[in-house]
Image (cartoon, grey):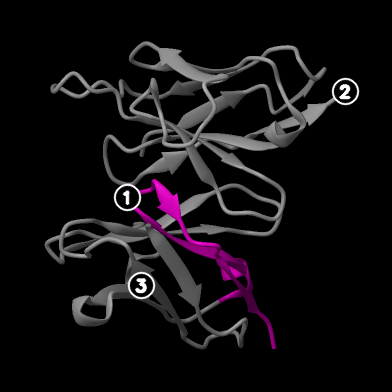
């Protein structure tokens, strides 16, 4: 069955770079899009960006200058890198297949 | 960006009764292919969002048929018949017609 699992550091210092990995199973990255969506504590859902089946990417315009999404199809992994982190980037980060199936999420706290 | 507006922000329902949640989009979500790209999700406490309804009225796999979606080009309704304890959580509508995907602020469903 379709599964997605996020991994990465739980704590990042301000101004540093966040690196997250989404490891998927049960579907092919070359046939499906994978999106990143984040949720600040107690708040709603914010789309971060996506990598499409063909490998092209789209980003939230507010985050675009700090954000990069890539993938390794041989390892069934999608990567998110966001630099210059601020406290406002504290959130649960989810990866999701086409915004249908979702991973469990990973909590990222930006704090010194 | 397309703005998704949900109402009410919270609803309290007696088990066994029905509940309706509304969502309005700032732009028509009807594609020229005839599909309306509105989606409904439930986020149970401490969990990731789960897809309930896709393309306005299609029940996602494994979702009880107590859930139904309907609407027009800009106004949408999620109806839950015979509410059960497991239905407690926050309901989000979302649009996948165009980038960036956007979500409503959420409607919290509680039991009386």
- Tell me, yes or no, whether dots 1 and 2 are on the same chain: no
Residue at image x 42%, y 51%? A101
User: Mark 3, chain letter?
Assistant: A
Mark 1: few/some/many CA within 10 Å (<14, 14-19, 20+): some
CB under 8 Å between discs 3 and 1: no
* Residue A108 inside the magenta-drawn segment: yes
Q: Percent position (x, y) of residue A51? A: 25, 63
Q: Earlier in the sequence, mark 3 or mark 1?
A: 3
The image shows residue A55 at horizontal and vertical percentages of 15, 66
Front residue of this view, candidates A34 and A43: A34
Up the image or down, A16 lies above or below A79; here it is below
Which residue is the site of mark 1?
Answer: A98
Residue assigned mark 3? A67
* Residue B105 falls inside the magenta stretch: no
- Residue B67 lies, in percent from the top left, at 54, 22
Q: Quadrant of the C terminus of chain B?
A: top right
The disc label shown at residue B112, or none? 2
At mark 1, the secondary structure is loop
Residue A62 appears in view? no
Q: Give the image quarter of residue A112.
A: bottom right
In the image, A73 versus A81, the foreground residue is A73
Q: Nearer the viewer, mark 3 or mark 2?
A: 2
The answer to whether A7 appears left or right of A98 in the picture is: right
Q: CA distance from mark 3 to mark 1?
A: 19 Å
**Residue drawn at the location 68% of the way across and 82% of the way down:** A111
Instruction: Give me the chain letter of mark 2.
Output: B
In the rendering, at what x and y percent does residue B3 appear? 44, 33
């Amino acid at each position: 069955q379709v599964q997605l699992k996020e991994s990465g550091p739980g704590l990042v210092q301000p101004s540093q770079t966040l690196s997250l990995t989404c490891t998927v199973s049960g579907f092919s990255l070359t046939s499906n899009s994978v999106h990143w969506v984040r949720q600040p504590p107690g708040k709603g859902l914010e789309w971060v960006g996506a990598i499409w089946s063909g490998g092209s990417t789209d980003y939230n315009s507010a985050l675009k200058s700090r954000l990069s999404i890539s993938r390794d199809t041989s390892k069934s992994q999608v990567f998110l890198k966001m630099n210059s982190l601020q406290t406002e980037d504290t959130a649960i980060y989810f990866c999701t297949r086409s915004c249908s199936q979702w991973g469990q999420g990973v909590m990222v706290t930006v704090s010194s | 960006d397309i703005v998704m507006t949900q109402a009410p922000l919270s609803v309290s329902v007696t088990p066994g009764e029905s509940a309706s949640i509304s969502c309005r989009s700032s732009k028509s979500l009807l594609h020229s292919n005839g599909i309306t790209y509105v989606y409904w999700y439930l986020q149970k406490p401490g969990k990731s969002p789960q897809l309930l309804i896709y393309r306005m009225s299609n029940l996602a796999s494994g979702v009880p048929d107590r859930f139904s979606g309907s609407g027009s080009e800009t106004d949408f309704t999620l109806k839950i018949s015979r509410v059960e304890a497991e239905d407690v959580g926050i309901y989000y509508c979302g649009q996948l017609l165009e980038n960036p995907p956007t979500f409503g602020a959420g409607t919290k469903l509680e039991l009386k």
